[in-house]
Amino acid sequence: MSDEINVIDRENSKEITEKVYGQWFLSWLYNSFPGKMFAPFFTNKIFSRIYGSLQDLPLSQNKYESFIKSFDIKMEEYILDHPDEKVPYKTFNDFFIRQFKDNSRPFPKQDKDFPAFSEGRYLIYEEINDKVVFPIKGHYLGVQQILENKELAEKFEGGPLIVSRLCPVDYHRFHFPDNGKIVKSYRTSGKLNSVNPIALKHNPKLYLENERHITIMETNNFGTLAYIEVGAICVGKIIQNYKGNDFSKGQEKGYFLFGGSTVLLFAQKGKLSLDQDILDNTKNHKETFIKLGARIGQSSTV
């Protein structure tokens, strides 16, 4: 079974092979007998919290320069915390949660346009029901299982699902897709498995097993949305840094500390139409890399 991950880069419509941070470890953890034996140790919260906290130590700054070179990260797009100093980030986590420069990722100005709320690899599904499999062939994960709330889940039955996977090399902040108001926010407890496709091949239910932060929001143009941040192996914390219940399109909602992570978003049936190119890629079992703020759909009602 190949662990190669191929992704469609939407900007140039080319298929690229993803360079996976820690690929040898993920392959060992999910493909080998010893890895599977030790998996409970590596996927529990204690391990990930400790590993994540190490990225806050000053010594961790020594590794981000090689990280930038290995993954060809375009640092000219980002704000440097200490631009006049030899070391612009004091820890690896400071680098990991780096912010884009103003206007480097504009959000659509049209109210009807639905933006990519994080920068990552997207899968989108027009309709989630018992005839649609997610995340891989042969397995169905329903909205009720993800939200762990039957009453809330009923709002989203038959509606679309958007999955945005963030690799460790990506921008790790996530944003609100519209103006609106938060009506409910809660966490579910769980493990911290990797959310990489290598892990999904061997554990298609990991989105149910992993810790999740769930926000139910009423938006001006897209109805009710369920916005879910999924924890993953080595993610130190999921930080919510918005204040109050009102939010605006493009406003930062929060960020993940070290690790690869995923954001899931459920919408109501008939409220959101998603772009055909991403739908086609998903049907072909290909993720689409999309930049933050790029249009990925539009309101069905505006």
Image (cartoon, helix red, strand yellow):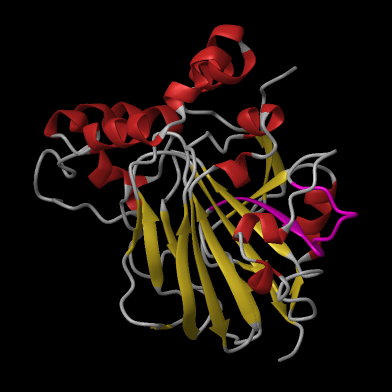
Identify the residue shown where x is 45% and y is 61%.
174
Q: Nearer the viewer, residue 249 or 258?
A: 258
- Vertical arrangement, residue 183 with respect to residue 128, above or below: below
Measured from the top left, where is residue 178 in percent x and y? Answer: 53, 80
Report the side of 192 relative to 57 (left or right).
right
For the question of whether residue 102 can be seen, the reply is yes
Give the dominant element type of the magenta stretch: helix, strand or loop.
Answer: loop
Q: Quadrant of residue 248?
A: bottom left
Please provide the residue range marked out in magenta: 120-134
Measured from the top left, where is residue 52 in percent x and y? Answer: 30, 36
Identify the residue shown where x is 65% and y is 82%.
222
Task: Give the mark count.
Answer: 0
Q: Nearer the viewer, residue 181 or 103?
A: 181
- Vertical arrangement, residue 289 with respect to residue 124, above or below: above
- Where is the C terminus found, in terms of image quarters? bottom right
Identify the residue shown where x is 52% and y is 34%.
193
Residue 54 lies within the magenta run? no
Identify the residue shown where x is 74% and y is 50%.
141
- Vertical arrangement, residue 169 with respect to residue 180, above or below: above
| Residue at the limit of the structure toward the left, as seen here | 85
Measured from the top left, where is residue 136 in percent x and y? Answer: 77, 40
Measured from the top left, where is residue 99 in percent x and y? Answer: 32, 57
Q: Nearer the viewer, residue 21 or 210?
A: 210
